[in-house]
Image (spheres, grey):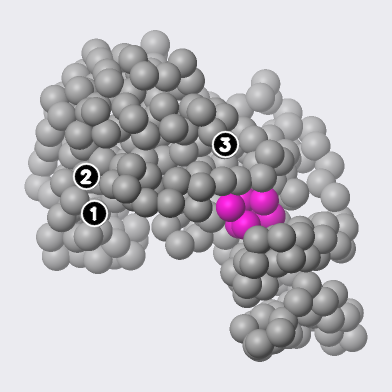
């Protein structure tokens, strides 16, 4: 089913959506929007900017997700992102991890809409690209709809026009980040209600979305859909999304493997990237197919060995074909 260029994206996921993962996803789908892992303002201001910000040009459209709360720091880092030619700056107001809370950002910021608004205002003044916010429907025992509307009222008043809403509460104490993705009930109705209340804003739903029919259903009510772990655990869904929503026929899996082999060789040769840092994102490419186990085993047992090169990828493909 073709629809007019919907906003479909892959969520920022810590330790997963690094530049090598994003390059891999982009080979499968040229249209979905990709997001970096969350990068803290402190890491950008005081650390290795190139390590955090570099990417391959093929990754566009690409958004930089920032973690932070100080307006001046956020503005400085948003400008870095624009100078690095990112297409969007996204502020993380949804991560519930204790480490993020100790830094006074992530989901705990939802309790401080004035702080978020000041950060958004500073970033909007600093850049000409869109500034967006990713949040939850609420935190802890707050009453969902009043809490979320107060947050959106204040932050949209500061100029934010796009809210990516994870349709679960975040419990800041008592639940791990993994449990926060699974235990609080999904309330898609609340996200849809926000679109009804704020028709002038872009409302994008996130959380627990794993199938094309689910994406189609959500797009009847909101402006976009962000998928998370399904894109990592079953990356070929991005090919199906390309076909159904953008009319794009993906390259074959074998072609993608060949292009990833070339990419791995280039990154390993020119930048010293360990082969395992790239191949770990490819383990589930053949999920559900005959030979998938042989593919995973061949990659996972050889990529970490000293002297591993891009050749192990084609060897793994051979193992898949032999077992199939």
Query: Which quadrant of the structure image shows residue 14?
Result: bottom left
Instruction: Tell me residue 241's x, y (percent).
Output: 68, 43
Q: Quadrant of the N terminus?
A: top right
| Residue at mark 2 | 105
Residue positioned 62% across, 57% down in the render: 20
Instruction: Tell me residue 16's x, y (percent).
Output: 50, 60
In the drawing, does residue 7 fall left or right of residue 261? left
Residue positioned 51% across, 36% down in the render: 63
Q: Earlier in the sequence, mark 2 or mark 1?
A: 1
> Which sits in the foreground, 241 or 296?
296
In the drawing, does residue 304 fall left or right of residue 196? right
- The dot on residue 100 is 1
Residue positioned 37% across, 45% down in the render: 44
Q: Which residues are magenta?
A: 19-25
Query: Which quadrant of the structure image shows residue 113?
Result: top left
Q: Residues within 10 Å of mark 3 (few under 14, many from 20)?
A: many
Report if the CB atoms under discs 2 and 1 are less than 8 Å apart. yes
In the drawing, does residue 192 fall left or right of residue 21? left
Q: Say if 285 sits above or below 43 in the image.
A: below
Instruction: Tell me residue 6's x, y (percent).
Output: 61, 27
Can the viewer see residue 207 in this picture? no
Q: Earlier in the sequence, mark 1 or mark 3?
A: 3
């Amino acid at each position: 089913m073709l629809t007019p260029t919907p906003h479909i994206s892959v969520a920022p996921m810590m330790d997963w959506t690094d530049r090598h993962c994003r390059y891999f996803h982009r080979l499968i789908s040229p249209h979905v929007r990709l997001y970096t892992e969350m990068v803290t303002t402190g890491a950008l201001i005081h650390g290795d900017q190139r390590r955090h910000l570099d990417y391959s040009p093929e990754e566009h459209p690409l958004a930089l997700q920032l973690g932070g709360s100080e307006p001046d720091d956020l503005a400085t880092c948003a400008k870095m992102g624009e100078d690095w030619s990112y297409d969007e700056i996204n502020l993380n107001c949804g991560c519930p991890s204790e480490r993020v809370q100790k830094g006074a950002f992530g989901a705990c910021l939802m309790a401080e809409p004035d702080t978020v608004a000041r950060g958004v205002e500073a970033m909007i003044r600093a850049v000409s690209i869109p500034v967006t916010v990713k949040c939850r429907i609420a935190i802890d025992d707050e009453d969902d709809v009043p809490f979320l509307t107060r947050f959106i009222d204040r932050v949209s008043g500061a100029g934010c026009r796009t809210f990516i809403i994870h349709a679960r509460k975040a419990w800041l104490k008592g639940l791990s980040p993994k449990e926060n993705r699974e235990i609080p009930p999904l309330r898609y109705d609340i996200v849809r209600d926000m679109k009804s209340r704020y028709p002038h804003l872009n409302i994008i739903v996130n959380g627990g979305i794993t199938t094309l029919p689910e994406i189609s259903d959500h797009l009847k009510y909101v402006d976009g859909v962000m998928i998370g772990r399904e894109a990592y655990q079953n990356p070929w869904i991005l090919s199906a999304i390309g076909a159904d929503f953008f009319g794009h026929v993906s390259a074959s899996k074998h072609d993608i493997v060949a292009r990833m082999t070339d990419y791995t060789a280039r990154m390993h040769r020119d930048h010293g990237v360990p082969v395992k840092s790239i191949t770990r994102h490819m383990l589930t490419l053949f999920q559900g197919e005959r030979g998938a186990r042989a593919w995973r085993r061949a990659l996972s047992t050889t990529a970490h060995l000293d002297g591993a090169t891009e050749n192990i990828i084609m060897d793994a493909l051979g193992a898949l074909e032999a077992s199939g």
